Amino acid sequence: MVLLGLRTQSSQSIGHPVRQPDGTERERSGFERDPNKYASSLKTMLSQKDGAEMIFIPPGEFILGTNAGYANEKPEHMVFLEGFYIYKLEVTVGQYKKFIREPQGGGHEPDEPYSVHMPNDYFTNPEYDRYPVVNVSWEDAEAYCRWAGNRLPTEAEWEKAARGTDGRTYPWGVAWDEQKANWDDETGGFRVDGYRFTAPVGSFPEGASPFGVHDLAGNVWEWVNDWYQPYQGNATQDPDYGQVYRIIRGGSWLRYPLGLTCTARDTCAPTLRYDSIGFRCASNLR
Ligand SMILES: [Ca+2]
Ligand SMILES: [Ca+2]
């Protein structure tokens, strides 16, 4: 179902009923009518194993995909999700250390080489414990989430956490703002956001999503659970579709502005590790 016009939804149209995939309409929930009203009272909880703050994303429909992006982001369509929790912040080096050092933890120590911008002691120096963990594969990320009693977010959950329900392009709104995310590695010869490589998690509070989730644009790409598959109704051919690549979302500190939208879909083989890819966890209601 294509929902032209919802991207630039006016305050008046926010009160209009939602047209559902079967053609019927339903009234908007209180949250959908006025998400800002709920922003200060959203439920949070702590993940017991790693102490991570988790934010509740309420049940309901949201707009997934966009007709304005790359072929793999189309078509724009409504998706209903049950309520879920998602980490407010990316998983940090400090949290990941706890995971690999616990007997029941496991996982692979992120010892792949770092690119020229990053310090070689990124994982071992406590100075970086509040920075996002990187050089973790999808399998590492999935194992961490399981150890923490959680799971990776689905691709749809990640997009809803980033985008809210108004179909916006960036977590903070419709327009690009170079100050609201860590996205520039300074190779362009100018300093845009103040960080040459990763930034401590939560360094861009003004770039948080409507639900108060941080760093969904930039800092590190984030593994999500899904294989790279076309959205329903997308007839484009892409040889990478299938069960070969996992999805990564949100772009990173490695200058690639086009990856920073809420809808951009990139991919990586699940066994590979890069210093621009990390993750966060999610969980069902409990
Ligand atoms: Ca930067
Ligand atoms: Ca991120």
Image: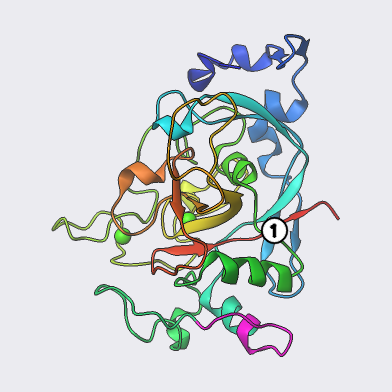
Q: Secondary structure at mark 1?
A: strand
In magenta segment, residue 140: no
User: Outermost residue toward the right?
Assistant: 286
Q: Which residues are magenta?
A: 99-109
The residue located at (77%, 37%) in the rendering is 59
Q: Decide if residue 120 is on the left or right side of residue 77.
A: left
| Above-or-below relation of 245 to 105 | above
* Res. 269 visible in picture: yes
The residue located at (46%, 48%) in the rendering is 206
The quarter holding residue 121 reads: bottom left
Is 77 in front, or is 161?
77
| Coordinates of residue 215 in the picture (x, y in percent) | 49, 54
Magenta: main secondary structure equals loop
| Above-or-below relation of 232 to 151 | above
The quarter holding residue 120 reads: bottom left
User: Outermost residue toward the left?
Assistant: 189
The quarter holding residue 107 reads: bottom right
| Above-or-below relation of 36 to 6 | below
Query: On the rendered image, what quadrant is the N terminus found in?
Result: top right
Disc 1 marks which amino acid? Answer: Met
- Some atom of ligand 2 lies within 8 Å of the CB belonging to the residue at label 1: no
The total of numbered circles placed on residues is: 1
Is 103 in front, or is 219?
103
Query: On the rendered image, what quadrant is the C terminus found in?
Result: bottom right
| Coordinates of residue 42 in the picture (x, y in percent) | 73, 46
* Res. 178 visible in picture: no
| Coordinates of residue 282 in the picture (x, y in percent) | 69, 56
Residue at which label 1 appears: 54
| Coordinates of residue 155 in the picture (x, y in percent) | 59, 45
Q: Decide if residue 219 is on the left or right side of residue 80.
A: left
Scheme of colours in the image: rainbow
The residue located at (44%, 28%) in the rendering is 236
